[in-house]
Image (spheres, grey):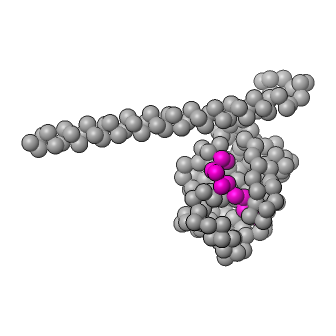
Amino acid sequence: MKKWILLVVVIGMVGWAVYDFLDSNKKSAVHFENVEELQEVEAEATDEGVEENQKPVIGLEVGNKAPDFQLDTLSGDSVKLSDFRGHRVMINFWATWCPPCRAEMPDMEKFHQDKDIVILAVNLTNSESSVEDIENFADEYKLTFPVLMDPNLDVANLYAIQPIPTTYMVDSNGLISYKAYGAMNYDMMVQEFEKME
């Protein structure tokens, strides 16, 4: 009898692992379709004089061109990543209910004050209780950088965000120079900032 119970548990675990693997592959496929669409749009918009093999690939790996996006800020302004070409940018995905996100916010604010960096703090708005919670959070931490609202998680899905916080450091050419899963501290931020063009 115990062998049968053990066998059923093992079969259930293997079945769940297979299901989870197939489901994650399906999500990855949808993500890559979005990146391919962005690459096609970018390719049409570039100058014809640039050779194909010299154009950076749009993607999420270090060395890829960061996918462009446009979101509204907490104050209602519209912000587009490509507007900051020529500047070093830190894109941070976060939520108010996330303890590691809360832990890194004071360091992000200090980093923003100390260095010539654009910080785009993309809030996973769909996961929040209310916009008021986000406003209270920004006031509590005295955030001076833009808090971007991602109400449908379009940008979070575009960037395949799994854990939060997740951070992408983008150089002045729009290329990803570093990505971090989990909270960063001030020293890490400065170290990666100094490596960027």
Residue 86 or residue 27, whichever sits in front: 27
Say above or below: 44 vs 102. Answer: above
Q: Residue at x 63, y 50 (%)?
A: 153
Residue 192 or residue 35, whichever sits in front: 35
Residue 24 included in the magenta stretch of the image: no
Q: Residue at x 80, y 50 (%)?
A: 80
Q: Quadrant of the N terminus?
A: top left
- State the count of labels: 0
Residue 88 or residue 27, whichever sits in front: 27
Q: Residue at x 84, y 23 (%)?
A: 51
Quadrant for residue 184, please give it.
bottom right
Report the residue that reaches farthest toward the bottom.
Answer: 140
Is residue 193 visible from the viewing direction of this image? no
Q: Residue at x 71, y 32 (%)?
A: 37
Look at the image and give the residue range highlighted in magenta: 145-155
Residue 26 image offset from top left, x and y in percent: 51, 34
Quadrant for residue 72, please give it.
bottom right
Say above or below: 162 vs 34. Answer: below
Residue 5 image offset from top left, x and y in percent: 16, 43
Residue 38 image offset from top left, x and y in percent: 73, 35
Residue 145 image offset from top left, x and y in percent: 76, 64
Does residue 135 appear to the left or right of 20 in the view shown? right
